């Protein structure tokens, strides 16, 4: 495994001295978390960077770098604008049974330590390629750095077991979630020069490296070889090392901005040159068309003046709309039964029409085009209508690419970032290339479907090669044959989303799909200490085979070619230990290289050091149960390709629970039962939610929906993944505050309102007593809607937000996602849902009688059925 060649090392840097804090680090305080949190707060802790890592006043405004942005400064808190004001979360009086982690105690400053300060005349000794660092050499190292967790690199445990046999227990496992494009708050340190890299393995100089002060040489944490720094790291004292950002921060963004590179496009031009082409289904019924038109009009109004769009309709033919005709909607028409010929594309591109235009010039024309759309006029069933979706996407790609470079005489500006094609589909692709028959009963359907799958995948790969992402937004009641369309969006780095209709949720996703910017040419490199083996990676990419052995002698990094680089993505990385670990620490380094939409080349380097331990209890206490649950869920969902597979995977979760209890739990006295380890109590509930939720359970009815959810989950960010595994339950309180509670049916109290965030769906449940009071009901509903909009403000795809009253038929969607804790004895209910203790006897009785009987087991019943005692 190798990585691409890098520019020559050794660029000089101008560093501004900092005021290092040389005080001894203090132990972390076990203080309680603050009682309130912002509505958009993550269920994962934010990154923790030491105060003394800010090198100078000139860098004190944190800079955020993401695929969607260049270098930004200013406010870090998203603007919350939806009235009424943002709700406030309040912690329950007693800790909930499954508390969601809040930020650990404030981290302490880094203390650099050095070895002896005896004379430095003797150079380091080399033995068999390794380094023997003599005591005479002043040597700076970060031996006493407290553990810090980056928001873009989350590990399933903060410690690693030394014993291979226990560390590699497959039921628990070990790994990390890495989000390459995640926006970091506060922003990462930014360096505008080439990085120093290990000449042996290619790893980057980092926060944890050991530095020889006299020579500026640094020791690689991955392969332990000594490297030169072109004299850059030569320092008279260890405090001077604070001047180098890569040696004082665990997250670094190396940025190359400027016109040094050929073809560099200025910021404003590069954004303007990445168009969005709408490819719209022309076979919709009147009701669906009206909703779609409303969403399209709102979409155009939401675009900035410099945004460029194109509009294409498809049915039996492909209509490419011309923005040069202002008085009426005018389009050039191509046949849809076959791929467009070079002659027809040449006539289109070199004609007089304008098919991509900026909003400031053509907004009114776009509105006229959308208003001119007409419903399908023939009396043919939705599934039987001819739709040449594949041909339409081919034409859209040709419009984006424009004339060949050699024929343009230098006057055509190429797209600066990822162009985007957004398909608005109301039915399957049944005409032209990549199509399938109208009916499943067609005698040759399996073969034609297989051919269509391959064609769609090739089209998606072609789009990716031209830096074009294809998103497919489906809506309506007609099945769209997800298995056929999914390869197109997946291979291009896009997404496929299903909607009930073309209304509000569809319109929001249309806007978010166009506004979210992607990095491109992404390459992720993962390096680990020799003791660690990467066994599996799940995420939006594929293994890259790049030969750089001429540059780095022993580059053993795992390289992943990313389809796109976005904030909404993450990689689930499973790891094992190769043998018993002898050293006190193991190291992990993630390096992602990509080009953002402003043509800036970014290299984000994240380096993590984890301590190793012999104690099993110390290891279990360090387990991060949300991360561990997500890793388990992604490994499980990867194998759940069909409904029958999903049923089988539910059985593997049962076996996982039993094995964890056997390996890490304790034996109940005078019994053969094992008690689930108390350190992992929250993990068992998350796995129960996974087992019965929409990803593996029977909540989702249609296999198309399950397939879309599965593919979305396998690539989703850590926050969205956690919500999709286990819903987040928030109870409305008087004054507009919200109390976060375990997702149990005991929260369905008749005088309250509850918000349940399940990732792709957000439910608002109003109790019957509350609903009977119009004033209180309206205020609670408004507060709940505000909360739902705020916590999903940046989420893509945007979830459905559904509101209903207690006792309504829709309430079943809500109940089915909660743990049926009312079936447990009262003492267990109070232990796992302490809020019950605040209710009066009458309220408790009323709550008890309000529940409807279900055959599904409660969490405790499920655990006991596995012969495991609940924690």
Image (cartoon, rainbow, N blue to C red):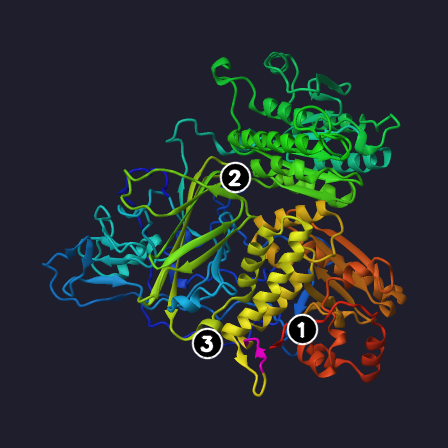
Q: How many dots with numbers?
A: 3
Secondary structure found at label 2: loop
| Residue 820 is a magenta residue | no
Residue designated by label 3: 617
Image quadrant containing the N terminus: top left
Residue 208 in which image quadrant: bottom left
Q: Earlier in the sequence, mark 2 or mark 3?
A: 2
Query: Can residue 260 be seen from the camera position used here?
Result: yes
Residue designated by label 1: 865
Q: Earlier in the sequence, mark 1 or mark 3?
A: 3
Q: Residue furthest bottom?
A: 670
Circle 3 residues within 10 Å: few <14, some 14–19, many ≥20 = few
Circle 1 residues within 10 Å: few <14, some 14–19, many ≥20 = few
Residue drawn 53% across the image and 63% down it: 628
Q: Is residue 137 left or right of residue 390?
A: left
Q: Nearer the viewer, mark 1 or mark 3?
A: 1
């Amino acid at each position: 495994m190798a990585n691409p060649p890098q520019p020559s090392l050794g660029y000089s840097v101008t560093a501004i001295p900092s005021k290092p804090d040389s005080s001894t680090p203090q132990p972390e305080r076990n203080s309680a978390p603050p009682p309130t949190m912002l509505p958009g707060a993550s269920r994962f802790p934010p990154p923790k960077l030491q105060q003394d890592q800010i090198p100078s006043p000139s860098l004190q405004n944190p800079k955020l770098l993401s695929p969607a942005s260049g270098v930004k400064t200013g406010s870090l808190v998203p603007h919350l604008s939806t009235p009424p004001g943002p709700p406030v979360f309040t912690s329950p009086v007693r800790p909930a049974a499954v508390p969601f982690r809040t930020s650990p105690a404030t981290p302490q400053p880094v203390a650099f330590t050095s070895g002896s300060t005896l004379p430095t005349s003797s150079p380091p000794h080399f033995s068999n390629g390794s380094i023997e660092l003599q005591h005479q050499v002043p040597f700076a190292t970060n031996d006493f750095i407290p553990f810090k967790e980056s928001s873009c690199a989350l590990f399933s445990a903060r410690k690693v077991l030394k014993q291979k046999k226990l560390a590699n227990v497959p039921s628990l496992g070990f790994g990390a979630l890495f989000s390459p494009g995640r926006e970091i708050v506060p922003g990462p340190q930014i360096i505008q020069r080439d990085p120093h890299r290990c000449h042996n393995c290619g790893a980057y100089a980092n926060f944890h490296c050991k530095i020889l002060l006299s020579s500026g040489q640094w020791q690689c944490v991955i392969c332990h070889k000594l490297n030169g720094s072109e004299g850059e790291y030569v320092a008279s004292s260890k405090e001077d090392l604070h001047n180098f950002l890569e040696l004082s921060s665990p997250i670094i963004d190396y940025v190359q901005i400027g016109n040094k590179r050929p073809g560099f496009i200025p910021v404003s031009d590069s954004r303007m040159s990445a168009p969005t082409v709408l490819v719209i289904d022309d076979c919709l019924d009147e009701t669906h068309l009206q909703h779609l038109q409303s969403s399209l009009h709102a979409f155009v109004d939401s675009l900035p003046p410099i945004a460029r769009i194109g509009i294409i309709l498809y049915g039996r033919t492909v209509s490419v709309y011309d923005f040069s005709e202002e008085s009426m909607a005018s389009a050039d028409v191509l046949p849809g039964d076959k791929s467009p010929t070079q002659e027809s594309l040449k006539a289109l591109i070199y004609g007089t029409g304008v098919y991509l235009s900026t909003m400031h010039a053509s907004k009114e024309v776009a509105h006229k085009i959308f208003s001119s759309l007409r419903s399908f006029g023939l009396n043919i069933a939705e599934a039987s209508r001819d739709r040449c979706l594949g041909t339409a996407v081919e034409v859209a790609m040709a419009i984006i690419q424009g004339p060949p470079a050699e024929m343009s005489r230098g006057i055509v500006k190429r797209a600066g970032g990822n162009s985007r094609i957004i398909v608005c589909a109301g039915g399957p692709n049944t005409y032209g290339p990549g199509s399938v028959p109208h009916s499943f009963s067609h005698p040759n359907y399996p073969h034609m479907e297989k051919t269509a799958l391959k064609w769609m995948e090739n089209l998606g790969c072609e789009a990716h090669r031209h830096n074009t992402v294809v998103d497919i937004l489906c809506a309506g009641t007609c099945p769209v044959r997800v298995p056929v369309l999914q390869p197109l969006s997946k291979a291009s780095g896009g997404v496929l989303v299903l909607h009930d209709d073309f209304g509000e949720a569809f319109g929001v996703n249309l806007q978010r799909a166009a506004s979210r910017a992607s990095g491109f040419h992404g390459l992720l490199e993962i390096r680990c200490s020799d003791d660690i083996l990467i066994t599996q990676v799940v995420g939006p990419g594929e293994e890259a085979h790049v030969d750089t052995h001429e540059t780095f002698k022993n580059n053993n990094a795992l390289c992943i070619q990313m389809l796109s680089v976005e904030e909404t993505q993450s990689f689930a990385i499973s790891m094992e230990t190769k043998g018993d670990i002898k050293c006190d620490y193991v190291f992990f380094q993630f390096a992602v290289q990509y080009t953002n939409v402003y043509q800036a080349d970014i290299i984000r380097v994240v380096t993590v050091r984890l301590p190793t331990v012999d104690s099993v209890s110390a290891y279990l206490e360090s387990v991060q149960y949300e991360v561990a649950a997500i890793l388990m869920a992604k490994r499980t969902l990867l194998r759940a390709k069909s409904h029958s597979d999903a049923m089988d995977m539910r059985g593997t979760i049962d076996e996982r629970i039993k094995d964890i209890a056997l390996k890490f739990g304790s034996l109940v006295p005078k019994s053969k039962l094992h008690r689930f380890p108390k350190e992992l109590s929250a993990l068992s509930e998350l796995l129960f939610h996974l087992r019965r939720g929409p990803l593996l359970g029977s909540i989702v009815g249609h296999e198309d929906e399950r397939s879309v959810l599965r593919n979305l989950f396998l690539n989703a960010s850590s926050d969205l993944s956690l919500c999709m595994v286990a819903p987040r339950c928030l109870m409305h309180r008087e004054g507009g505050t919200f109390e976060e509670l375990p997702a149990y049916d005991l929260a369905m109290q008749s005088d309250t309102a509850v918000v349940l965030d399940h990732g792709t769906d957000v439910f608002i449940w109003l109790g019957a007593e509350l609903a009977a009071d119009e004033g209180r009901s309206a205020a609670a509903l408004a507060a709940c809607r505000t909360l739902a909009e705020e916590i999903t403000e940046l989420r893509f795809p945007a979830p459905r937000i559904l509101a209903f009253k207690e006792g309504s038929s829709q309430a079943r969607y809500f109940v089915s996602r909660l743990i049926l804790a009312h079936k447990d004895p009262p003492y267990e209910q109070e232990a796992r849902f302490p809020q019950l203790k605040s209710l009066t006897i009458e309220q408790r009785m009323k709550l008890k009688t309000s529940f409807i009987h279900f055959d599904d087991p409660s969490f405790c019943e499920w655990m006991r059925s596995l012969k495991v005692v609940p924690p």
